Image (cartoon, grey):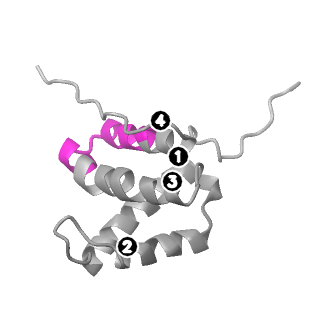
Amino acid sequence: MAKIAVVAPADSSSPLHRLVDDYLMACRARGLAKGTIDNSYGYPLRSIFLPWCDAHDIQRPEELTPRQVDAFSVALLDREGRNGRPLSKFSVHAYARAVRGFLSWCANSTFAPMRARPPRPGG
C-alpha cells in the first residue's frame, strides 16, 4: 500500500507563508512528485522567496507589485548559492519561475483570498 506524503508546513506566521504551504499541497494533490515539489518549488519558495518577503515586510501576495518581483529577481542575481558562488542565470530563472507559478496559482485559485468573489445574495 502506498504511503500518503504530506508537505510539511514551513512557517504559518503570515498569510503568504500559509499560501505557500497551500500551493505546495495543491502541487502534491495534482500528482507532482515529492522530489519535484521539494526541490523545484519548495526550496525556492520557502528558503529564498519567503525570507526575502519577510525582509521586505511583505505578508500577502497582493502586496507584491511587478517592481518588487523584479527586485526579487535582481536580488537573486546578487545572491550566493549553497556552494558560495553566485547563482547561475539558470538557477535565477528556475527560482523566479517557481515564484511566478505560485503567484499565478494565487491569482487563479478559488482558495486564494485575493480572488474577487461575487457577493452572496442577501449579504
Q: Is residue 73 left or right of residue 110?
A: left
Q: Which residues are magenta?
A: 21-37
Mark earlier in primary sequence (3, 1): 1
Corner quadrant of residue 78: bottom left
Mark 2 touching mark 1, by CB under 8 A?
Answer: no
Graded by Cα atoms within 10 Å as few (under 14), some (14 to 19) or many (20 or more), the crowding at tag 4 reads: few
In the picture as drawn, the residue positioned furthest to the right comes out as: 122
Q: Given the image, on which type of amino acid does mark 3 rest? A: Asp
Residue 19 drawn above or below residue 95: above
Q: Looking at the rendering, which quadrant does residue 21 occupy?
A: top left
* SS for callout 3: helix
Q: Of label 4 and label 3, which has the lower sequence position?
A: 4
- Quarter holding the N terminus is top left
User: As shown in the figure, which amino acid type bears the numbered disc 4?
Assistant: Ser
Overall secondary structure of the magenta section: helix
What residue is rendered at 22% in x and 25% in y?
4
Residue tagged 1: 16
Q: Is residue 28 among what the camera can see?
A: yes
Q: Label 2 amino acid?
A: Leu
Q: Which residue is disc 3 drawn over? A: 54
Residue at image mark 2:
76
Gap in angstroms between the C-alphas marked 4 and 3: 12 Å
* Tag 4 secondary structure: loop
Q: Amino acid at mark 1?
A: Leu
Q: Nearer the viewer, residue 109 or 79?
A: 79
The CA span between labels 3 and 1 is 9 Å
User: In the depicted view, which residue is nearer to us: 76 or 65?
Assistant: 76
Residue where numbered disc 4 is placed: 12
User: Would you say 6 lies left or right of 11 here?
Assistant: left
Residue 11, image x, y percentages: 42, 38
